[in-house]
Amino acid sequence: MAKGKEAKGTKVTLKIARKAIRMMPNGQHRLTLSNMGITVFPKCLLKLTNVDELDLSRNLIEKLPESIGNFSSLQWVDLHSNRLESVPESIGKLVGLTHLNLSNNRLTSAGLPSTLGSLTRLKSFNLGLNQLDTLPLTLNGLESLQELGLFDNCFTKVPEFVTSLRNLTKVNMKRNWLSYSQDDGNGMMKKKSESKEEVYLVHESNLCGTCLKRCKEQGERFTKGGGSVMIEDKRMKTYSGLMVPNSVARVHQDVWRIRPY
């Protein structure tokens, strides 16, 4: 990045934005403005009513305008690796969204509006690499959700609404401080919190008979009193500065990233 570019920010004009639109193999129009040093969301983009997919990842955007809700044509949005601390309530108006990536920002639980529950067509939602410990209860309305990324946050337990989402097949909760119970050796259960490397939840309806039986048998071995489940303390080696693939929204993304701040 050129000297002084980060402070001043890159100005995106309507002309620049139009030239950045590409037709995707699926017939949709994607606007890619990734890694351009953008600090302020370009409001001129709202005039591009033919854009279905928007990629503003790897920039320096700190805030989304309330007018983002007027970008009604959007079906796919990638805002990972910015500096967002909150999301405006108007995002709930983007009812056509099927994929939303907000990973690697600075989002707190207070910065997530309840209107996110209005995105009933959402299939993939990535909130990994933020500062979240709870989620809005209204997310139980995301009836189409299939994949949910919550890795590298501050959760101490799996959000309760997760079990009510019938189409949800994958929940990534790597590296959170999940609470579990452990026998202290004297027959008493002691609660502990550990940062776990891998926790995946898969609805039993998506398992074959053999796998379902195996999971139940394993669960019985780990369950001890009160229905609490011990999670095996198996740690994987991690490397400073490296992160998980960009998004659970696109299963073929295998490029590792370096935190931009």
Image: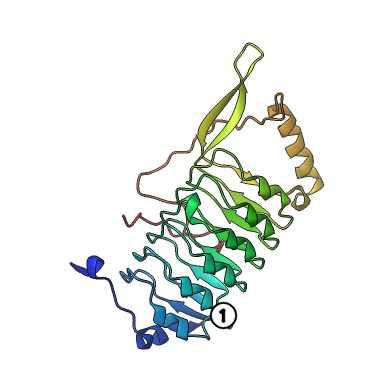
Which residue is painted at 66% across and 45% down in the image?
160
The residue indicated by pointer 1 is 73
Which image quarter: residue 166? Answer: bottom right
Residue lying at the far right of the rendered structure:
209
Looking at the figure, which quarter contains the C terminus? bottom left
Which image quarter: residue 28? Answer: bottom right
Give the vertical position of 63 relative to 148 (above or below). below
Which residue is painted at 76% across and 47% down in the image?
204
Q: Is 56 or 164 nearer to us in this picture?
A: 164
Q: How many numbered callouts? A: 1
Q: Is 164 or 146 nearer to us in this picture?
A: 164
Residue 131 seen in the current view: yes
Instruction: Give coordinates of residue 80: x percent, y percent.
Output: 44, 62
Instruction: Give coordinates of residue 141: x percent, y percent.
Output: 68, 59
Instruction: Give coordinates of residue 8: x percent, y percent.
Output: 23, 70
Instruction: Give coordinates of residue 56: x percent, y percent.
Output: 42, 70
Residue 1 seen in the current view: no
Badge 1: how crowded within 10 Å, few (<14), some, or many (20+)?
A: some
